[in-house]
């Protein structure tokens, strides 16, 4: 009789470890190498790459408040399907996650679901209003143990408030994740990168410099306060340049890039399709090239999805009036494989660093981003790196269908995900507890 | 051509054909009985998400003079203001069996989006700061009536180009018809990336109105919207007028044969002096008059009237 908590993964390619068998037992990696105990469920991993379970620094789960677009449960299923074992749930829910109680509620919903570890992000300011600090310390001391704070969706544009937040989170090793966008420069409702396309289509343009100036300012504030700042969804070559300079100076800045900013250019807006309306906007090819280079050379630390599910009726408006955001969890690893690994820009070890190790470090998630070694928590992902998959939005585990890769052929297929030894995805099927 | 969403939908032949037919329609407009039977049995809905008495009336009259059944739907106070999506609104109207939708929307791209959801013919009657192709056709028609063939004619379009849907359509159409076009505006009101606009190659742009003035055959002044005056695009209305208004001095510098256009409504004293607006070579009222004839022509061609 097979034991549902004992798995033998046969012949996977371990990042940095060659072809190995992995024995999972009692939630940990019990053996790496040859092992075949009776009763284990055997997973044929011939041709598959084994990565430490992916960690997403930037997920919108919409619960509470917009359960018609996504719930913690459906978002967790999408995450497991994408190879994630932990996600950080952004605070812009309704009500906003700006108290210990709100954070614990999201945390508990994730635990009850059990497909991924759902770690709430706390708001920087009360109600995301950008005026006064939320209860950062109480959220940090709560059962949820919040360590990442962000007003994501909005920029903390008041320099004094940003300074205070950076100073305050030092007390408990927190980090402020900034949605870098100077609101006066990114004025207007349509959200299109400012350039030839925005001018021609008559869409208000959001210039790259609106991001760059906040990144530069916050890096200087982080230097001044001696605190950690994390730049969410970096989208411009200018931001990359500033972050590269700051890291060379030894400033404690980290940064993430989304799969869509690595792959999709602003030209997708030619037909005003709101599927591609996202904040920050899709950028031109020159920016994309710099983002890929920066991810490959470590200037950008992590890939984060900014998974932003929306109900159909929130996207089926005129472009200027449609909601911002696109899905990301299920295709993130495929996109990174397609645009970074297959062209030879990144190794699988670098992918493991960018999608698991570094995000776990930035978020302070001790049980994640660990090496695939004996005694470590069995959080891992298996991907077939060579399968070509045509994305079908209808097949998503998310409640929403705003999938920018619908109809796109991506390379790679996530085959299995294990969270503390339990299979949450096996043979591409999500397995609920 | 199934829809008219952008001036870029029109080839030179298409445009000339529409303008020729517009001339015939203009004759109808001058008759005592202004009625043609060509769209009898056809239903057109003017779906206006934004107020525009001038454009809506023009389309309404055009449709009725062609014997179509014309219904006006104003989005204000309708289900749209209650949160209905654009798709639901368009599909609801289309489900009533209409043949054509004339759409005015405050958001760029809305008419194009609607074509993805409905089968009916769609005419863009102005979308956000994107395009207004029938305005460009009526402007071209009016200029052509006075100047003849527009090929090689020098036209300047002056003013708030960034926020003007008129300029985008006019630039494309005038280039299609062979005119030399110069766009003039302060740098703050020049559209992003204009140097690389692929939609209408072969035009020029600049910031100095006086430099281009003596060589023009036509000048089109664009309205400066009031909210721009406090939006930091230029320091004061006075400074704007000095730099970019069609003032008396500039009127003198304009060649005698050159015509003056303005899509209206005008800010007299800001972008155009009363003298210029009321001059004999001002075509501003001709533009309004041409609106019905041009829209009759567009509806006739798009709704299969040519074959009827």
Image (cartoon, helix red, strand yellow):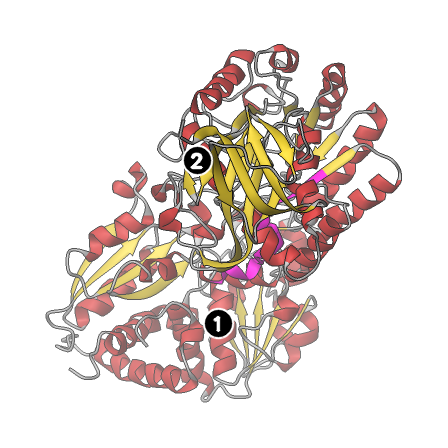
| Residue matched to label 2 | A77
Q: Position of residue B125 (x, y in %)?
A: 35, 62
Quadrant where the image shows the N terminus of chain A: top left
Check if mark 2 and mark 1 are on a common chain.
Answer: no
Q: Tell me the SS state at disc 1.
A: helix
Viewer can see residue A341: yes
Q: A293 or B86, which lies in front? A: A293
* Magenta region includes residue A197: no
Asked if A133 appears above or below A427 in the picture, the reply is above
Asked if A411 appears above or below A226 in the picture, the reply is below
Q: Which residues are magenta?
A: A255-270
| Residue matched to label 1 | B170
Q: Position of residue A283 (x, y in %)?
A: 62, 55
Residue shown at 66% from the left, 34% from the top: A359
* Magenta region includes residue A257: yes
Q: Secondary structure of the magenta portion, mostly?
A: helix
């Amino acid at each position: 009789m097979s034991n549902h908590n004992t798995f033998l993964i046969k012949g996977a390619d371990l990042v940095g470890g060659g072809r190995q068998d992995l024995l999972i037992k009692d939630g940990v990696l019990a053996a790496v190498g040859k092992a075949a105990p009776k009763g284990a469920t055997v997973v044929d991993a011939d041709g598959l790459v084994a990565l430490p379970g992916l960690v997403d620094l930037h997920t919108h789960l919409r619960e509470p408040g917009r359960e018609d677009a996504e719930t913690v449960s459906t978002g967790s299923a999408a995450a497991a399907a994408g190879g994630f074992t932990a996600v950080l749930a952004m605070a812009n829910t309704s009500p906003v996650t700006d108290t210990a109680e709100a954070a614990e509620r999201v945390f508990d919903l994730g635990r009850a679901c059990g497909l991924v570890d759902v770690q709430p992000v706390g708001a920087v300011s009360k109600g995301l209003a950008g005026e006064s600090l939320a209860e950062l310390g109480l959220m940090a001391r709560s059962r949820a143990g919040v360590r990442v704070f962000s007003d994501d969706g909005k920029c903390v544009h008041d320099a004094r408030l940003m300074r205070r937040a950076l100073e305050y989170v030092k007390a408990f090793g927190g980090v402020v994740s900034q949605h870098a966008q100077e609101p006066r420069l990114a004025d207007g409702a349509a959200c299109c990168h400012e350039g030839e396309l925005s001018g021609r289509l008559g869409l208000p343009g959001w210039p790259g410099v609106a991001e760059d100036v906040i990144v530069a300012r916050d890096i200087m504030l982080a230097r001044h306060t001696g605190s950690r700042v994390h730049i969410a969804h970096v989208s411009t070559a200018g931001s990359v340049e500033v972050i590269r300079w700051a890291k060379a100076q030894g400033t404690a800045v980290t940064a993430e890039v989304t799969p869509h900013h690595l792959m999709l250019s602003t030209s997708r807006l030619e037909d005003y399709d709101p599927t591609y309306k996202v904040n920050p906007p899709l950028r031109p090819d020159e920016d994309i090239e710099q983002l890929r280079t920066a991810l490959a050379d470590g200037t950008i630390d992590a890939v984060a999805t900014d998974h932003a599910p929306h109900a159909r009726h929130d996207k089926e408006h005129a472009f200027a009036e449609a909601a911002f955001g696109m899905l990301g969890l299920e295709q993130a690893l495929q996109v990174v494989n397609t645009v970074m690994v297959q062209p030879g820009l990144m190794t699988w070890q670098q992918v493991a660093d960018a999608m698991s190790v570094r995000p776990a470090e930035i978020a302070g998630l001790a049980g994640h981003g660990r090496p695939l070694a004996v005694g470590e928590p069995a959080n891992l992902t298996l991907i077939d790196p060579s399968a070509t998959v045509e994305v079908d939005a209808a097949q998503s585990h998310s409640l929403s269908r705003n999938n920018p890769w619908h109809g796109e052929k991506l390379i790679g297929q996530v085959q299995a995900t294990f969270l503390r030894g339990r299979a949450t995805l096996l043979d591409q099927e999500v397995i609920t507890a | 051509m199934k829809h008219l969403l952008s001036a870029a939908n029109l080839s030179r032949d298409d445009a000339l054909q529409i303008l020729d037919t517009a001339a015939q329609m203009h004759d109808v407009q001058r008759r005592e009985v202004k009625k043609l039977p060509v769209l009898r049995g056809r239903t057109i809905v003017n779906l206006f998400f934004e107020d525009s008495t001038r454009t809506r009336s023009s389309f309404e009259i055009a449709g009725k003079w062609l014997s179509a059944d014309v219904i006006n739907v104003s989005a204000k106070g309708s289900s749209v203001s209650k949160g209905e999506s654009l798709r639901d609104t368009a599909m609801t109207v289309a489900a009533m069996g209409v043949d054509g939708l004339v759409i005015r929307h405050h958001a760029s791209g809305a008419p194009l989006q609607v074509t993805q959801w409905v089968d009916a013919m769609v005419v863009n009657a102005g979308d956000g700061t994107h395009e207004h192709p029938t305005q460009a056709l009526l402007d071209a028609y009016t200029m052509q009536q006075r100047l003849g063939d527009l090929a090689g004619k020098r036209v300047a379009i002056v003013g708030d180009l960034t926020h003007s849907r008129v300029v985008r359509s006019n630039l494309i159409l005038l280039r299609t018809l062979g005119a030399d076009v110069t766009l003039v505006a302060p740098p703050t009101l020049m559209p992003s990336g204009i140097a690389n606009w692929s939609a209408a190659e072969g035009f020029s742009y600049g910031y100095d109105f006086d430099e281009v003035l003596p060589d023009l055959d036509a000048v089109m002044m664009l309205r400066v919207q009031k909210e721009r005056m406090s939006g930091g695009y230029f320091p004061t209305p006075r400074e704007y007028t000095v730099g970019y208004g069609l003032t008396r001095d500039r009127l003198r510098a304009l060649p005698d044969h050159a015509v003056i256009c303005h899509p209206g409504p005008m800010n007299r004293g800001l972008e155009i002096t009363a003298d210029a607006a009321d001059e004999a070579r001002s075509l501003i009222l001709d533009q309004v008059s041409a609106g019905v004839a041009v829209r009759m022509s567009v509806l006739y061609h798009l709704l299969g009237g040519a074959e009827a």
